Image (tube, rainbow, N blue to C red):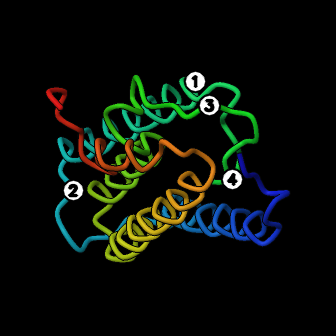
Amino acid sequence: MTDSTDTPNAAGIGWLLVSVQAVLLLGLVMTPGGDAWPTPAWLDTVGLVLVVGGLGLVAFASLQLGSALTPTPEPRSGSTLRTSGLYGVFRHPIYVGVAVIVVGLVIGSGSLIRLLLGAITLVFFDRKAAWEEGRLTSAYPDYPEHLAATRRWLPTPSNR
């Protein structure tokens, strides 16, 4: 099993990725609403439901990782690969939860700046997931099998 001590550069990249995601998410939360599209009360409600649902998904997926949860996308040395529960539905359920939060923050905002930041954030998380998948492939010999069987963003059909 590899970890950040095997490749010091990977640890630095991991912390850089976490820093960028923090800036993007803070920017999304701090950007004021706008009037680029109508934001009726029902749309605000949908946005709030998405944010709360995304937070729940992040929390539940984090609990399922248990001691394997790390602050960076670097696998923890000695941990086991999670492929059941939410990790059998999505490869990155925490990132899916964050994506749901991002959509919730954008749709009820009416802000083009939030829309742009949201799009950048979603692309960023897709690229971060791809980088993490390379690290997971190095750490877990059976990860390529999980890659082939589980989708990154969309739910994987249960009849695989």
Quarter location, residue 97? top left
Q: Residues within 10 Å of mark 3 (few under 14, many from 20)?
A: some
Q: Residues within 10 Å of mark 1 (few under 14, many from 20)?
A: few
What is the CA distance from the residue labelled 4 to the residue labelled 1? Answer: 16 Å
Q: Amino acid at mark 2?
A: Thr
Query: Along the polypeptide, which appears first: circle 1 or circle 3?
Result: 1
Mark toward the viewer: 1 or 3: 3
What is the CA distance from the residue labelled 2 to the residue labelled 4? Answer: 35 Å
Mark toward the viewer: 3 or 2: 3
Q: Residues within 10 Å of mark 2 (few under 14, many from 20)?
A: some
Q: Amino acid at mark 1?
A: Leu
Question: Which residue corresponds to the image point at 28% horizontal and 54% vertical from the top-left?
Answer: 108
Q: Secondary structure at mark 2?
A: loop
Q: Amino acid at mark 4?
A: Thr
Q: Amino acid at mark 3?
A: Thr
Q: Secondary structure at mark 3?
A: loop
Mark 1 — residue?
A: 63
Point out which mark residue 72 bears.
Answer: 4
Q: Residues within 10 Å of mark 4 (few under 14, many from 20)?
A: some
From the viewer's perspective, tell me whether residue 72 is left or right of residue 152.
right
Mark 2 — residue?
A: 39
Point out which mark residue 80 bears.
Answer: 3
- Whether pointer 4 and pointer 1 mark residues with C-beta atoms closer than 8 Å, the reply is no
Mark toward the viewer: 2 or 1: 1
- Whether pointer 2 and pointer 4 mark residues with C-beta atoms closer than 8 Å, the reply is no
What is the CA distance from the residue labelled 3 to the residue labelled 2? Answer: 45 Å
Quarter location, residue 46? top left
What is the CA distance from the residue labelled 2 to the residue labelled 1? Answer: 34 Å
